Amino acid sequence: MSDTAPAIVCSNVSIRYMIGDFKNIGLKEWVMHRLTGRYHVEEFWADRNITFSLDRGDMLGIVGSNGAGKSTLLKVVSGIMEPTLGSVKRRGRVSALLELASGFDADLTVKENAYLRGAMLGYTRKFMDETYPYIISFSGLEAFADRPFKQLSSGMKSRLAFAIASLVKPEILILDEVLAVGDGAFREKSEKKMREILGSGATTILVSHSLGQIRALCNKVLWLEKGEQIVFSDDVAGVCDSYEEFLRSPAGTKAQFDPGKIAAKRAAAKAEAERQAAERRRQEEERRRKAAEAAAELARLRADSAKLAEVRRILKGGGR
Amino acid sequence: MKDFLSVWRRHKFLFEELVKRDFKKKYKRTLLGVGWSVMMPLLTLLVMKVVFEQFFGRNMEHYTTYLFCGNLLFCWFGEATNAGMRSLYGNASIFTKVNVPKYLFLFSGNVQTLINFILTLCVFFAFCAIDGVSFTWKFLLLAYPVATMLVFIMGVGLILSALYMFFRDLDYLWSVFLQLLMYGSAIFYTIDKMPAKAQFVFACNPVYRHIAYFREIVLSGTVPSLGTHIVLAGFAVAAYATGAWMYRRYNTRFLYYV
């Protein structure tokens, strides 16, 4: 494994879901379906022809509106699902943190859940024994350690989930909307922790609806819309800009990334800024000029009034 | 084999935690919980004993032990397959988010029912002593049908849990089938006076074959034939291979059916 080889290569990945009358049915319905032929199964392509490759240490942000196929793509990249077409190649240990707060067991205690989750994420018992005090204090649940999980608030649950998950030291990290959870103080703590993980050099894929996060953290970006790949690019700011514009535009607008348009827009914005600066400079000059004139006028008036006083004094003296 | 060991090493911790979870959930942290699951086969045994001895007037020697042999194994099979059937579906929220071997959920449940069985087995030996059965070294051979039954149960569990993902009404059918199986496993009657054809049907019933092995050792004090050993192993391997094949085939497709 050479260091220059890409960490993830996702080539022409398409994922098809079947939807319709085959889920949650019994043998009875199935037989009836077969006999009468009256059932309806539809194909649904969650993702179509997604292609990208990431080098080691790359951080990819995935953007797209709801139902764009982001989470499905993450499931395929992390190996939970197989692509219907295409292939995904990974180099290194993958750790996927998907929908963190779910998958806990309501009847177990906080501690038991913590261990179970740790085991699911592939930690060892020794590691959990060592880090459990840290997990509990990081999530601020010291008082709840032996309570059943169902007594916790949803914020507490996601705090615990985050505290456990953030211990990963994977080579490839896959995150689905898990950055920064909880209330103010915890959000700050978790963001700091997240930056630490992201700074550790793991190849990271991040799905987030916060474009701020993506702009701040990612060096590559993938934009999906209705399962189609709009663009994969390293122009993070440009793609984020045009995605934002797409979000603001009326429904039905075609999603597209036009680097030329973005560049032109940026140039126009720059020119506008320069024009405003020049205007400000001109106004400043004007103000200074006026101030100087006023000062000169004031000096002149002062001189005049001194002269006047002198004249009055002379006249007074002469009249005596 | 090396593969198996590395998988086991990697997932040992998860497996242990799953076993613990199943245990805690089942018994709700009470000692009485464990007691109840041992009581259940005993109560069934009591009912059968009263019904068949008092009403049907069965009076063979060691009838209680005879009944218990059948009940012991049948209850294990029924409990383990019922729990196993739901093991995959019940853990859907986990395997749709984390990439873990899916059979771990079934096997952790199997550990639980195995422990239950072993506890009941201890009670069984106590009953044997009370009933005046003479213990011999041959009792050690009982480990063999326990082992083949365990693998057979795992195999049936794999098959059922996979099918249950596709057909959610399987549990009704299975409980009907278990009833049929109970009547067809000669738990409370003997088959030696039946015609050869009927006896052949019983010979094809894996649960009956295991029960018969137990009875032969415990009641007759003889060692079953080599053929019986092979047949028991054959049932286990066939069930397990079928189940493993299904899991391999549908491994990445289960989550479409959640």
Image (tube, coloured by chain):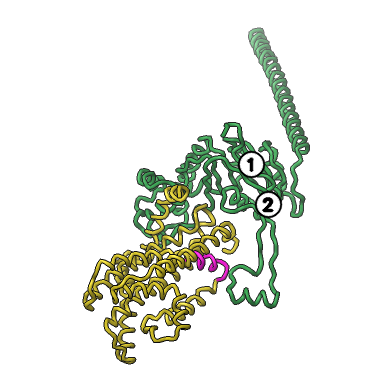
- Residue B154 lies, in percent from the top left, at 45, 64
Question: For residue A9, which numbered disc appears in the image?
Answer: 1
Q: Is residue A60 left or right of residue B79?
A: right
- Residue A193 lies, in percent from the top left, at 47, 40
Span highlighted in magenta in the image: B157-167
For badge 1, the amino acid type reads: Val
* Observer-nearest of A251 and A34: A34
Chain B is shown in which shade? Answer: yellow
* Residue A161 seen by the camera: no
- Up-down: is A191 above or below B63? above
Question: For residue A85, which numbered disc appears in the image?
Answer: 2
Residue drawn at 39 percent across, 81 percent down? B186
Tell which circle, 2 or 1, labels the residue nearer the N-terminal end. Answer: 1
For badge 2, the amino acid type reads: Leu
- Residue A213 lies, in percent from the top left, at 58, 41
Give the mark count: 2
